[in-house]
Structures are given as C-alpha cells and as structure tokens.
Amino acid sequence: MTNRELEARLRQATERAVPDELDAILSRCDSPRKGTVIVMEEKKNTRFGPKAGLWIAAAACAALVLGVAGFGLGAGWQAGNQVASIVSLDVNPSVVLEVNNKEKVLSAQAMNADGTAVLGDMDLKGSPLDVAVNAIVGSMVKNGYLDELANSILITVEDDNVARGQALQQSLTQEVSEALAANAQSGAILAQTVDHSDTALQQKADEYGITLGKATLIQSMVDQNPQLLFEDLAGLTVNELNLLAANNKNTPSQIVSTGTASDDAYIGVDAAKAAAFAHAGVNEADVLALEVDFDYEMGQMVYELDFHVNGVEYEYDVNASTGAIVKFEQDGKNAGQTTQGGQSQGNASSGGQSQSNPVSGGQGTVLTAEQAQQKAFAHAGVDAASATVIKCELDRDDGRQIYEIEFWAGRVEYDYEIDAASGNVLKQEQETHALGLNEVITPDAARDAALAAAGCALSDVWDLDVSEELDEHIPCYEVEFKCNGMEYEYRISAADGSVLDVKQEWD
C-alpha cells in the first residue's frame, strides 16, 4: 500500500466518524432564532478542547487504518529480515552470507582468519547477493587466495526449499565464473545444495572450525573412500580437496564440478612418473595401463600411480611436492629381473649367505626362515642389523609355499612374499611412517593409558582389543574394551601415550 493510498483511507475514515452536521442543525432552529447570537459559558475544567470529539474519532480511525496497514507493513518487514538461504564460499578463506527471499544480504560472517582478511572493512549488509559475491571473489583474488596455483572455490547453498536452493546454486556458479574471468582467473568451481537439518554433520563442522558446506564435501568423499579420514581432510584447502575429488575412488556425490583444479603447486605428473619408474627400474616405453591420480597418504598429497610391466603390477605413492617415494607395492616379480637401481637379484642368496640348510616343506627343498629374510633384506637394500622383523611365516598360496615377512628399518615398514623354493620376490610393499618402531610406545603401554583414562582396571574389562595404526598422519593405537556396562574406543598417541580421541556408549 502506498503512502497516498494510506492517506486517502485515513481521510475517509475520519469523515465517516465525524460527519459535518452544521447545516442540519441550523435547519431545525426556529426562524426567529436564526441569526441570533447565543452566548455560551466556558467551562474551566474541560480536559479537552472543543474539537476533542473530532480528534478522538480521527485518532481512533487512524489507529484502525494504521493497524490494518501496519499488519501488511510488519509482515513485509519481517519477510525482508528473515533468512531464506545461507550461502558459503570456501577456498581456504571461508565466508558465510545470510540472504533473504529477495536475495539481499542480511549478514556476512568470516569463518576463519583468512575469511576476515577477505572481508576486510566491507559492509555487505543490504547488498544484492550478486554484488556481494563479486566483491568477495575479487578480494580473494586480490589477496592471493585464488590464483594459478590454487584456483578452486566451493559454493554451498543451504535452503529448506530445494528448488529455490538449486536455482540459487546455478546462478551463483555463473556469477562466480564470470567474476573469476573478470579477474583474469581460470577457476574450478564445486557447487552443492545441502540440508542444514543434519545436526550431526553441523556439530562436526563446528568441531573442526569449518563450514557445513566444506564438512558435507569431506564427508561425501570419506563415504566413497573409507581410507580417507575426515580429520585429515578438514585442514586441506578446497583446491586440494578438488584434486582428490578427481580421483574416481574419492569422487563425492551430489556435487557439480566446473573447470579443472590447478596442480601447478606440485611437481607434476611427468616428474611423478619418472620417480616411480626409476625406483621400479623400468623403462617408460615398457609401461602398460598407466593410471595417475592424486591421493592423500601420511598427511601429504601424493601422486598415486598404477601400472604394469612384463606381467608385473606396480602401485606407487609419490610425494606430490618432493617426488619422494612414500609407498610402493609390487606383485608378480620374477627372479633375474632388475629391481630398484637396476641391480639383478637373480637366485643367489643375499649377502654371500649360503643356502646350505634347506628344509623340507612337503614339496621339495625350501629356504629357511633366515634365508627368506635375507632375500627380503637384500631386495629392500636394508642391512639385517638395522631391521626389526615383525612376522616371518611359512604359508601356502596357489599351490606353492611362500614366506610372508614383515619388518621395519627406521621409519619404513616392509611387507614381502618370498617363494620358499626359489627365493624369488613374489610381492612387496613399502610404506614410510611418521615414527619408527623404536620411537613409539608398546601396545601394552597404549592399553594401560586407555584404561587409566577410563578409570578401569585390567581385571575388570572384557572384549579388549589393541590395534596399531602407525600409518596414520598421527601414529596411534586404537584400544577398544568394555567395562562396567560401557563400551570404550580410545585413540592413543603412539609417540607419548596421550589420549587423541575417545568414544563411549552404553553397552
């Protein structure tokens, strides 16, 4: 209702409440009295003036009209200040915008220190959403958060109205794309519409100090690949998450991806291939079925390479920043083939050791456990004196006898399968950890730390299990047990026995 319409209604209401009766009153007077002046005595105690009735009636009508109009105005004011959608923009800076149903910004909040730097002294309240988004993206480019080394941005829309949320998601994707182009940037955009009724995920987002949008993206990737850990990914930038999301085993659901994430901050695929091929002692010309993807291992971005050479399958993780070999597996290698460094392993026993003490394994002569270990040590290039053997077992696989050997040297863990008859290396794995065996507490010490934290005695617990998780970014032990009607799950630091995490529930 316009101001003019409101004034007209007020005037009409006033006229109806106090009509002009002067002519009617005079017509009812006797003719001799017409034109006679009648003196009226003034009453001193009258509280209101002679036009009190008029003004009281007018005020009442005005109150009525304004009340009706005010209802409409109040409803409009309330709708204009009610949050209809929440938009978050994540790069590493994270900014959250609350928006009304007219796509006007009600508030802008920085979720971290980088977000504060991006917003600076900008007052975006009341701004159209597209104007605010352009200003934020421009500030991200200006402050170096979006460039040729890291060009990914995550757009998340939270809205109870799914159709409205998805429409807003699409328009924002276009808006951000144009804003990046205007700043001479080739961007990679991840966009999603989420349901903010997921309180458990919101709690997780609050725990790690990230937006619900980033938490949703991470959780979706973890759901696709359980080997990924939420706590590891929470600290990554959106560009790093985008690189990981391009790996088919990590690809999140319900996400719309536009553009390609930049990997210019890393050594590149060619350098990663060269490092893996040199370590495997193979020529690139002989490589078949090569696959290269980004992955996350031991708290670092890695290139994950899978390839075949002469019937042998190789799997390598190469540090994406340094080119160091983080982990490798090899399956099907035969004696006489060259290994790392191009040296032939052949059938000779390692270190000049004699194979004079064979034993019978039921299918002819086999190596002793010590001889099998020496084969593994020689292949790994490890001195026997520096190795700690965890496992050496004679087993049978595909009709032949093999030794399964696990050992550590420094911070590197090795797993081998050795043909018990020929001494050939059938399979190998290698993984570098944050701590070596001589740097970690024992499983019993981890168990005792968990029991002490729970206030339980060893004699009072059951279903006790202690497992090593030394390959995590923070090496730890997982300790599970039941006591006094409760079920406990502890993560104990392998370095100092401190409690990293605990979960408990009624059994």
Image (spheres, rainbow, N blue to C red):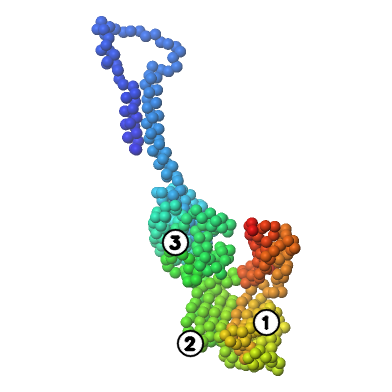
Query: Which numbered disc, 2 or 3, marks the residue that appears first in the sequence?
Result: 3
Mark 3 and mark 2 in contact (Cβ < 8 Å)?
Answer: no
Which kind of residue does numbered mark 3 sit on? Ala
Crowdedness near tag 3: few (<14), some (14–19) or many (≥20) residues, C-alpha within 10 Å: many
Is residue 122 visible in the rendered structure shown here? no
What's the residue at 38%, 30% (across, down)? 64
> Where is residue 441, by image quadrant?
bottom right
Q: Residues within 10 Å of mark 2 (few under 14, many from 20)?
A: few
The answer to whether the residues at label 1 and label 2 have Cβ atoms under 8 Å apart is no
Q: Amino acid at mark 1?
A: Cys
**Location of mark 3 (residue):** 191
Q: Counting other residues with Cα less than 10 Å from the Cα at mark 1, is it few (<14), some (14-19), or many (20 or more)? A: some
Q: Give the Cα distance between marks 1 and 2.
A: 37 Å
- Image depth: mark 1 or mark 2 in front: 1
Which residue matches tag 1? 392
Query: Disc 2 marks which residue?
Result: 285
Point 50% across, 74% down: residue? 293
Find residue 261 and report its horizontal and vertical position in percent. Answer: 47, 69
> The residue tagged with tag 2: helix, strand or loop?
helix
Number of dots carrying numbers: 3
Q: Position of residue 494 (x, y in %)?
A: 68, 68
Tag in front: 1 or 3: 1
**Gap between marks 1 and 3, in whole Å?**
50 Å
Q: Secondary structure at mark 3?
A: strand
Furthest toward the front, the residue is 362
Quadrant (top left, top right, bottom left, bottom right) of the C terminus: bottom right
326 or 179, nearer to the observer = 326
